[in-house]
Image (cartoon, rainbow, N blue to C red):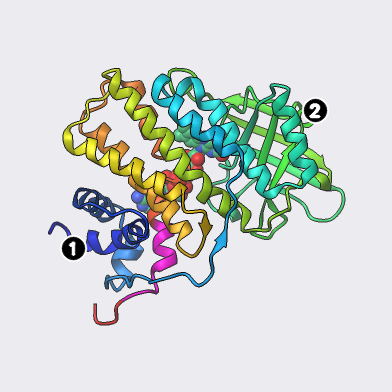
Amino acid sequence: MSCELGHIFAAPALNAIARHTDVEASIRELMAASATRLLDSMMIVADSCAPFVAVEQSHVKLPVAQPPVLHGVRALVEEIAVDGFGPHAMRFFGMLGSIMVSLAGTAVQVAQVMSWVDAGLTGTFCMTDRGGPLASQWRSCATTGSPVKLTVDKVWAMNASRADFALIVVRRGNSMILAPVLLAPDVYAQAATQPSGAAFLDGHLPLANVQAMLEAEPSWFLNEGGPISPKIFLTLARPWLVQALCSHLAWLARHNRIVLNAEMGERVAFLRQAAQNQANLGVFDRFSEDQAMALKWIANEIFAELVVSGAVRHKGDQRDLLGFSKMEGSSYRCFFEIYERNKKLRRVDG
Ligand SMILES: Cc1cc2nc3c(=O)[nH]c(=O)nc-3n(C[C@H](O)[C@H](O)[C@H](O)COP(=O)(O)OP(=O)(O)OC[C@H]3O[C@@H](n4cnc5c(N)ncnc54)[C@H](O)[C@@H]3O)c2cc1C
């Protein structure tokens, strides 16, 4: 066996995936190597490094209704395999955004967004904050009390400079509670946007920064579904994102833009199967967040390995795949969150 420490620290993620898909040795090796590189100082110095105990079952299982828009998402995953991700990216992410609104919005808010989409308008989802990754560092916040003062200072949001409306996640007051806010077209028109870097996917996917200072109406906030709704959203959305990315890899391979050797081909096939199995689970339980993060971590490592090994011919495609290995959770972020949730579950004889 290769690095024992890496296998120990990759185990919680791989155990979560093994609940729905057998994890082959080549994936175990890839993830053990990744975990070995990602171990941070705190883990190396202070962790017991004992093997993790796999939890057998979850006592609380919340059935998650499959939103109807997932039929459209499934169809787009097929179309991406034919045309590549570029021409379909905005529609794909727009559909994922509408799932967030359906989980956290009132019937009125959902109907509003549907009417904008039906009228051909597009939205943007702004999460990444200029202040840094921790909620305590966020500059984007809404004051409590009345009137509500809303400060928006977001970076790297897809389509932000072309979008008509926006879903923006902000901090409420000094609490660490995050709240999504819906900015209607007439309100979002008041925000300032600046393009950020070259567009991804052959020019189809531009990112931009967004700034605004506004007086917000209470009706702009998406409060339905409670604080668990963003978690449910991410567990629903990530397996579809990973399937879309696998379709994009298939398209790149067909156009000779990546060369998959047998082992990488098998890893990509595993990733697609695991993403499909995960998308079909239909429940939210104590394993769901680890499963979503583990799937993204495996995807990140496969993309990075393709780039590092020289399998991706063009610089633009290399940048796209490395970009996708960061969005919705970099490897360190996924690894760290899974570790945090599992670190107390250790074998005492380890
Ligand atoms: C193509 C693309 C599209 C995007 N679209 C959107 C969008 O629509 N909306 C939006 O809001 N955002 C978007 N983003 C931004 C993206 O979501 C962020 O890049 C992502 O959120 C970064 O967050 P992270 O916390 O996972 O990763 P990181 O930035 O990698 O890490 C977070 C923190 O962990 C630390 N860290 C990282 N690696 C290590 C390590 N090895 N050891 C110790 N510490 C480490 C970092 O210093 C940082 O503090 C997009 C990005 C890309 C590339």
Q: Circle 1 is placed at which residue position?
A: 4
Residue at screen point 71% across, 25% down: 118
Q: Find out whether the residues at labels 2 and 1 contact each other: C-beta distance under 8 Å.
A: no
**Residue bearing the label numbered 2:** 186
- Which SS class for mark 2? helix
Q: Which residue range is magenta in the image?
A: 336-346
Q: Main secondary structure of the magenta part?
A: helix
For marks 2 and 1, the one nearer the N-term is 1
Q: Amino acid at mark 1?
A: Glu
Rendered image quadrant of residue 194: top right
Number of the label disc, if any, that sits on residue 149? none
Residue 84 locus on image (x, y percent): 41, 22
Q: In the image shown, does 270 or 30 lie closer to the viewer?
A: 270
Q: Is residue 196 visible?
A: no
Residue 72 lies in magenta, yes or no?
no
Image position, residue 210 (x, y; %): 64, 32
Q: Amino acid at mark 2?
A: Asp
Q: Is residue 345 magenta?
A: yes
> Residue 115 location in percent, x, y?
76, 30
Who's the residue at 26% across and 24% down the image?
258
The single residue placed furthest to the right in the displayed view is 146
Q: Is residue 40 left or right of residue 121?
A: left
Locate the C terminus by quadrant.
bottom left
Give x and y (percent) for residue 243. 41, 37
